Image (cartoon, grey):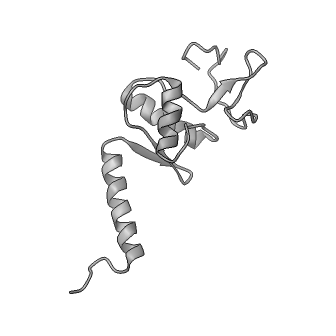
Amino acid sequence: AGNEHGDPIQQLEYRISRLEGVLRLNKMITESGGKIFATNGKKADFDATVEKCKEAGGSIATPKSPGENDAILYFVKYFNTYAYLGIKQSLIPGRFQLLNGAQLGYTNWYPNEPSGKGEE
């Protein structure tokens, strides 16, 4: 009995490809710059979102390029809601930083934002 998908690595690549296809079809994942951005489509508060991302073996999305920003916007538009990002206000009002305290290397705020009112 031959195996139509070859060695175990080819079998895994095939299965992963199928799973990714289903997730893309259901608007649960998108990709940018080699990173996979995922959602379960459910609403949650910030802390629950951070925890769910950790449970899934990832981290809350933090756009570091226009392409990654677009990947996050894909979900915002599809689910017609906002998205939490891995960014927090620093000790200086109106200044923001990564959750680990590092400086932001990429921002794409609307004019007069961020205001903290959900329209950044």
- Which residue is at the front of the view, 61 or 76? 61
Residue lying at the far right of the rendered structure: 92
Q: Residue furthest bottom?
A: 1
Where is residue 115? Give x, y as percent.
64, 14
Q: Quadrant of residue 111?
A: top right
Q: Quadrant of the N terminus?
A: bottom left
Name which quarter of the figure residue 114 lies in: top right
Q: Is residue 9 left or right of residue 32?
A: left
Instruction: Tell me residue 71's x, y (percent).
Output: 50, 40
> What residue sits 60% from the left and 39% below the top?
66
**Outermost left residue:** 1
Above-or-below relation of 31 to 116: below
The residue shown at (42%, 38%) is 39
Which of these two is toward me, 114 or 55?
A: 55
**Residue at the image point whose x is 55% and y is 37% from the top:** 60
Q: Is residue 89 left or right of residue 40?
A: right
| Percent position of residue 113, x then y | 65, 17
Whole-percent x, y for residue 23 in the image: 34, 48
Tell me which residue sits at (52%, 25%) in the image.
46
Image quadrant for the C terminus? top right
Left or right: where does residue 68 sit relative to residue 77?
Answer: right
Of 14 and 113, nearer the camera is: 14
In this picture, residue 79 sits left or right of residue 85: left
